[in-house]
């Protein structure tokens, strides 16, 4: 009746031991973490120094070394939810069509007459006014000929632009399919650039995720504030080289549609009128480093890839003696005269940089420009001290909770209560083991989840023990009562825990951040507590029973 | 000698006062709704948008002078509360400053935060800011939707599961009890003006999980007894089931409450509201399992056709360890 086959006993034992082994590194959190950091560093190809080796030796490599990740509310750090301004990209895409459209329409000069780009529509539309409205249909047809199929999975067979004409104006806008494809590219590019910038700062395990169509969630543990994080990722650092048309001191000066007005970075009141289309952009940049120029001033060096270098070389060769502007984020850093052709594709920007600025500019240039601006919808900073306080408080509370439950259980059920206590300890270890294994994150509500589990985990045992008490009144002998107790309590245990598990699943699906951490610990806690309550205590009781063979038992 | 929370073999008549308790539950629910609508919930920035700044200093918090320092910044509605907690050190003085969402600003303005921090530093050079949180109105609106969705989805899922495993009357009874627990929790949060944020929603869902757990255990016993005692009136079977499970109900509530009390006293102020909600829910949930869920089942009646073999809910019952 109380027989449990050997393989079942062994399986239960192995599960418990595995859980304990997986949970063990969390007891020595700092040591295991230093070991893991050292392993990661070595995998990345860092030279093994004595210091690194010492860190590596903090934890034996043969044992599992994964620890639970601590959430931002425990470790401290910054959390940002950013919305990418996808429309920004449409405007620059539209700008890119203008030279092509212009050349096409110039070829039709005898039908459409003179053409002029007008900026009276939304930024994501290209509007061209023709002086001969009768020729508009021909113009529309010709520009339609420029359309290319969209490069995306969903928009197969669709063109990238929509062209329409009304009155004397031709309007070109991106098609829906092209917008969707552009959005996807923008998001992928933004994610990649943010990841690179955050990695440059060298923080541990940042989370950078796309959420929904246009949002990015960034969580960086250990960073001082959300403000710092925003400065790190939010600066665009778009490098462009433009031919200078003329300089001016009037910020309101009217410029033609092929030109653009940019202020000088360090000479207030000086404005440059530049050709709108840059000769080379930061996209062609392969490297950038902080340096010092001949006079010992901090400077930033740059190097282009072959196509960038060719374009730059050709331009400088044809325009010796002319001015060209180096612009960072739409501000002219410097506008030197081209003294000689620069075929090598590398150069140096000198402005009034400080050493730190030069350093930061180089980092931003290396990482590349964000394709679109970002608006921050949510930002949270938690200081490391507050996190540590929460961990300490959580630890004390968990231990006190556990002690209280143990005393209560032993007082109520005697030896059986002690068995339940052992199961409870294994249960908590299993929760940590599973969390470490799946790389789960422990948050402050998660700690509350564990404490709650400590309280509720004994429920299954209470159900069983109460049932055994009842069965003892009627059943023949203690062995039968124990067996019936487990058997008959099972449906209540299963139903009760499945419903709670449903709630945990919903919390996980819909929650975010700390709430999700809570759902994970609650869900894992339900699984492990059912396992320990049904299997572990049963094995313990059976082992005890086989050894003692009591005639009567008291529960 | 064992600790017994209840004597062995009780035969207390729980259903005797059912009209009174059910009436009391309804009154409490109505009162909760009235308080909720009249006083309103003290929404945190998760749902309202805005910024909270936690300050910490070795100097005592003077709410009045904090307010004077912030007034020139014209930030609109600013709420400053001093936080005290037994886990704090003697020279640890903490305050929470909540600033409403600034008009027209979707994104959070770093200038505002810098200005606030600067103003307070001028007042108290020792001051530090252990946490700064800002939520824009767009996100807070979505969070409300998600929270409502989570609570409704849980209720529907449980309604469905109980209906599958028991009978529809049980599932209506269970969900009525859950509804009761949620309303009463909202009521007490309105009454005591405890901050209501995302964590509170998580707490409410936990309450739902705990309360259903309790209800299901009693239902399970009721189902078993209904098969055993086919001729006994429903009300007597119910009483018997409650009495039989009473010891377990109090044991489980007892251990859970012990654990939660430890957390509420020692767990720090950051999660106090969250733990309080769960503690309250455990109390209300234990009550509602007996007095709301079963009352509703009693009113709806149970189909007890003796010719129909009832095998509902036994499909998992033969799992052997």
Image: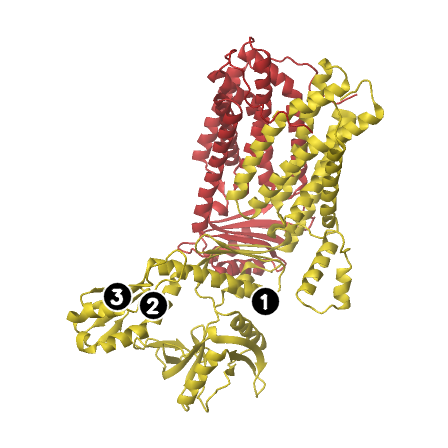
Chain colours: A yellow, B red
Q: Are marks 3 and 2 in contact (CB under 8 Å)?
A: no
> Which mark is first along the chain, 2 or 3?
2
Compute the Cα span from label 1 to label 2. Answer: 33 Å
Q: Which residue is mark 2?
A: A94
Q: Chain of mark 1?
A: A
Q: Is residue A56 above or below residue A338?
A: above
Q: Which residue is mark 1?
A: A200
Q: Residue lying farthest left?
A: A134
Q: Chain of mark 3?
A: A
Q: Is residue A344 above or below residue A527?
A: below
Q: Is residue B5 visible?
A: no
Q: How many marks?
A: 3
Q: Chain of mark 2?
A: A
Q: Residue lying farthest top?
A: B231
Q: Which mark is residue A171?
A: 3
Q: Could you tell me which residue is drawn at 46 percent across and 37 percent down?
A: B40
Residues tagged by mark 3 and mark 2 found on one chain of the structure: yes
Quadrant the C terminus of chain A occupies: top right
Element assignment for label 2 = helix
> Which mark is first along the chain, 2 or 1?
2
Residue B299 location, x and y as percent? Answer: 47, 16
Q: Which mark is residue A146?
A: none
């Amino acid at each position: 009746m109380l027989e449990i086959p050997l393989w079942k006993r062994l399986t239960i034992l192995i599960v418990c031991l595995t859980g304990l082994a997986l949970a063990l590194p969390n007891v020595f959190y700092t040591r295991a973490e230093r070991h893991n950091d050292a392993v990661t560093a070595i995998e990345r190809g860092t030279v093994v120094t004595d210091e690194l080796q010492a860190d590596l030796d903090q934890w034996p490599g043969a044992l599992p070394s994964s620890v639970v990740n601590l959430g931002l509310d425990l470790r401290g750090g910054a959390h940002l939810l950013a919305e990418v301004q996808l429309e920004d990209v449409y405007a620059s895409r539209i700008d890119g069509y203008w030279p092509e459209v212009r050349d096409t329409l110039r070829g039709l000069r005898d039908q459409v007459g003179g053409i002029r780009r007008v900026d009276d529509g939304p930024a994501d539309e290209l509007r061209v006014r023709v002086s001969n409205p009768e020729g508009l249909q021909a113009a529309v047809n010709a520009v339609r000929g420029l359309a290319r199929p969209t490069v995306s999975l969903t928009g197969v067979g669709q063109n990238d632009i929509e062209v329409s004409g009304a009155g004397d104006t031709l309007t070109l806008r991106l098609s829906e399919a092209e917008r969707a494809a552009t959005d996807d590219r923008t998001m992928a590019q933004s994610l990649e650039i943010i990841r690179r910038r955050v990695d440059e700062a060298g923080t541990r395990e940042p989370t950078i995720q796309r959420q929904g169509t246009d949002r990015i969630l960034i969580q960086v543990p250990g960073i001082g504030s959300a403000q710092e994080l925003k400065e790190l990722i939010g600066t665009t650092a778009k490098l462009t080289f433009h031919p200078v048309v003329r300089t001016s001191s009037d910020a309101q000066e009217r410029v033609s549609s092929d030109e653009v007005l940019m202020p000088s970075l360090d000479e207030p009141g000086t404005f440059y009128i530049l050709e709108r289309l840059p000769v080379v952009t930061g996209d062609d940049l392969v490297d950038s480093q902080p340096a010092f120029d001949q006079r010992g001033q901090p400077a930033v060096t740059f190097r282009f890839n072959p196509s960038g270098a060719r374009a730059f070389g050709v331009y400088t060769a044809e325009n010796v003696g002319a001015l060209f502007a180096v612009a960072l984020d739409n501000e002219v850093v410097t506008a030197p005269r081209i003294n000689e052709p620069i075929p090598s594709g590398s150069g140096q920007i000198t402005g009034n940089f400080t050493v730190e600025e030069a350093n930061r500019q180089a980092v931003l240039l290396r990482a590349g420009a964000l394709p679109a601006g970002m608006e921050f919808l949510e930002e949270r900073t938690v200081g490391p001290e507050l996190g540590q306080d929460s961990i300490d408080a959580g630890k004390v509370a968990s231990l006190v909770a556990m002690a209280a439950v143990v005393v209560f259980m032993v007082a109520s059920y005697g030896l059986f209560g002690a068995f339940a206590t052992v199961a409870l300890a294994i249960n908590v270890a299993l929760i940590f083991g599973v969390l470490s294994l799946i790389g789960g994150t422990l948050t402050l509500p998660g700690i509350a989840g564990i404490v709650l589990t400590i309280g509720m985990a004994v429920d299954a045992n209470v159900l069983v023990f109460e049932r055994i008490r009842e069965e003892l009144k009627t059943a023949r002998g203690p062995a039968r009562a124990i067996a019936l107790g487990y058997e008959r309590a099972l449906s209540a245990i299963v139903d009760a825990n499945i419903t709670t598990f449903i709630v945990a699943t919903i919390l996980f699906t819909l929650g975010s951040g700390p709430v999700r951490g809570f759902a994970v610990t609650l869900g894992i806690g339900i699984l492990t507590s059912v396992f320990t309550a049904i299997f572990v205590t049963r094995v313990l009781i059976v082992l005890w029973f086989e050894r003692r063979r009591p005639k009567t038992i008291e529960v | 000698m064992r600790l017994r929370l209840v004597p062995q073999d009780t035969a207390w008549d729980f259903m005797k006062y059912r009209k009174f308790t059910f009436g009391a539950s309804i009154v409490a629910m109505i009162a909760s709704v009235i308080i909720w609508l009249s006083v309103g919930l003290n929404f945190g920035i998760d749902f309202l948008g805005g910024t909270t700044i936690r300050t910490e200093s070795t100097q005592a918090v003077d709410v009045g002078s904090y307010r004077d320092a912030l007034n020139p910044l014209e930030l609109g509605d600013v709420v400053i509360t001093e936080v005290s907690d037994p886990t704090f050190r003697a020279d640890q003085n903490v305050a929470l400053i909540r600033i409403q969402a600034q008009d027209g600003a979707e994104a959070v303005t770093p200038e505002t935060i810098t200005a606030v921090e600067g103003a307070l530093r001028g007042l108290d050079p020792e001051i530090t800011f252990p946490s700064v949180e800002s939520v824009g109105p767009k996100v807070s609106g979505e969070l409300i939707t998600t929270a409502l969705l989570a609570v409704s989805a849980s209720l529907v899922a449980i309604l469905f599961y109980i209906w599958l495993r028991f009978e529809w009357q049980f599932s209506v009874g269970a969900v009525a009890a859950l509804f009761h627990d949620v309303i009463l929790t909202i009521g007490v949060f309105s009454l005591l003006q405890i901050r209501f944020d995302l964590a509170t929603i998580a707490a409410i869902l936990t309450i739902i999980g705990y309360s259903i757990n309790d209800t299901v255990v009693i239902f399970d016993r009721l189902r078993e007894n209904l098969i055993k005692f086919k001729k006994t009136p429903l009300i007597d079977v119910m009483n018997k089931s409650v009495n039989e499970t009473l010891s377990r109900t109090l044991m489980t509530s007892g251990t859970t409450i012990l654990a939660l009390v430890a957390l509420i006293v020692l767990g720090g102020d950051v999660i106090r509201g969250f733990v309080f909600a769960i503690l309250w829910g455990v109390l209300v949930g234990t009550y509602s399992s007996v007095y709301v869920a079963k009352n509703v089942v009693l009113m709806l009646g149970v189909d007890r056709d003796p010719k129909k073999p009832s095998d509902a809910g036994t499909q998992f019952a033969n799992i052997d360890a």
